[in-house]
Amino acid sequence: MIWYFLFTLIAVTLIIMASLILYRVRESRRSKQQLKLTNNWKMYFDDRFATEQSRNVVMEEATFKRLQSIEELIAFFAGGAAYHHSPLLEEREQFRQLIRSNKKDWIQLGQAYGKKKLIEKAYFAYICEQLRINEPKEYDELTELMVFLH
């Protein structure tokens, strides 16, 4: 009887250890993937703002469609943080202009996030607030959408 108990205890311990190892491997892969996505967005913004000719403020529709993935949205926000919080006024203004000029796409993106899980809706609302897509005194379709997401 005691051998059966010890064998069961050892088996359960091995299963828990294997689960923890698999969890760490998965998290490591997910972290590397997120870092890769963030670096891709950083390069996108760097290329976008590098020269006068490439400062087109309208983002492509396909680019915005990528943001329907929460992982892409997180990477977009992280990748743009250097411009959003830049000590250089010109960089902050370029980034702000890029965000504000694509407001209609942010509204469509909000409608897509309106159909997602609550945590994803909340993160989308957080990013919209952080990026200051709307001015504080503005009340428009995006503001109504944020109220609806709540």
Image (spheres, helix red, strand yellow):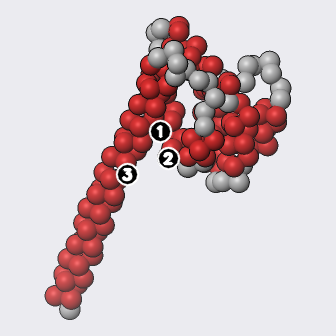
Which one is earlier in the sequence, the residue at label 2 or at label 3?
A: 3
Q: Is residue 126 left or right of residue 26?
A: right
Number of the label disc, if any, that sits on residue 71? 2
Q: Read off the residue under disc 1.
A: 75
Report whether residue 129 is seen.
no
Camera-nearest residue between 62 and 18? 62
| Secondary structure found at label 3 | helix
Which image quadrant is residue 126 in? top right
Against 129, is 67 above or below? below
Q: Are the residues flagged by discs 2 and 1 in contact, CB closer than 8 Å?
A: yes
Camera-nearest residue between 3 and 56? 56
| x and y percentages locating residue 125 in the rendered image | 66, 37
Q: Amino acid at mark 1?
A: Ala
Which image quadrant is residue 148 in? top right
| Secondary structure found at label 1 | helix
Which one is earlier in the sequence, the residue at label 1 or at label 3?
A: 3
Q: Is residue 94 left or right of residue 10?
A: right
Bin the neighbour count of mark 2 within 10 Å (Cα to Cα): few under 14, some 14-19, many 20 and up: some
